[in-house]
Amino acid sequence: MALALTSCMSRVASTDIEYQTVDAGVAYSAVEALTYREPHARIAYGNDPLQHGLLWLPKEQAGSARSADKAPVVVLIHGGCWLNAYDINHTYALSTALAQAGYAVWSLEYRRSGDAGGGWPGTYQDVLAGINHIEQLQNYPIDNGRFVIVGHSAGGHLALLAGRETPAASAVVGLAAITDIIAYAAGSNSCETATARFMGGTPQEMPADYAAANPADHTTHATTLLLHGGSDALVSVNQALLVGARTLFVESAGHFDWVHPGTRSFNVLLSTLQSVLAE
């Protein structure tokens, strides 16, 4: 594993950003337009420029690595249909809001479809390496023994797979997560049709690879929760049913509500984090 290459970025400001309450069914463009704070640090977990994580700290801890009160960690895996057209940037506001709520956020960038080394299994290997790199963050005021893996959409798919190999995590939380990649590949929307590109072929052409990449074919992490919007047009509510997982539906919520801090769905996520980290 590569040595960490850390560079300090903008200092977390002392005043919180206020995210206005919005109705369910927010658009991706609305998420992209949100204000955010820069992360406290950018840290490499591998040699490729895309193999890095961004660390947000709660504002009261950002100035000192010797804080007595270490924050629990949200390991965040962004979505975007596994495609390199969608990067980590659209989750900056989510990371900001989670840090304002008192969590350290270790948000992972990774190689995706269209990147050299991206796709299956390279994308998954990146995510797993990024999660494991949390052990190297001991110089920051975080409790790296108390963390939750959270993934949105295709990032939820990756989080569910990584959770089975990360028993030390307090929980795995899938936000509009793709839980059955074989069923998902049969769909026709813009994200479903990207599945074959990510996998390098169809389920019929690559049955063994799809079985290895399919959360529905594996045992889940002992504490797995699926949060799903009742009006999600990109990931069907059928994907929210997974043996071994607890599911909570938010009525009328859309796909991108989970990454907008002004939604009811975000408040459900906060309540979920508080619950699993208190156990």
Image (cartoon, rainbow, N blue to C red):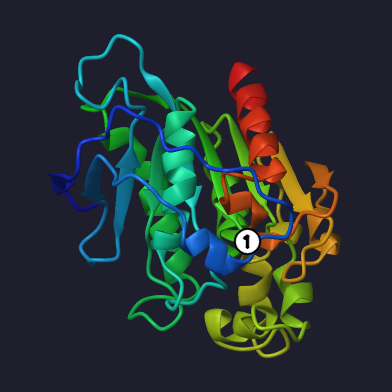
Question: Which quadrant of the figure has residue 134?
Answer: top left
Residue 57 versus residue 76 in the image, above or below: above
Locate residue 60 relative to residue 163 in the image: left or right.
left
Residue at image point 41% right, 51% down: 35
Q: Position of residue 68 (x, y in %)?
A: 30, 9
Sort mark 1 into few (<14), some (14-19) or many (20+) by Cα contacts within 10 Å. Answer: many
- The relative height of residue 193 versus residue 89 in the rendered view (above or below) is below
Q: How many marks?
A: 1
Residue 36, how many percent across, how many down? 38, 48
Height in image: 238 above or below 243? below
Q: Residue at x 20, y 22 (%)?
A: 65
**Quadrant in which the C terminus is drawn:** top right
Specify the farthest residue to the top.
Answer: 68
Q: Is residue 74 visible?
A: no
Hey, what amino acid is under mark 1?
A: Ser
Observer-nearest of 236 and 139: 236
Residue located 64% across and 43% down the image: 21
Residue 245 falls left or right of residue 5: right
Residue 152: which quarter of the image?
A: bottom right
Which residue lies under the disc numbered 1? 153
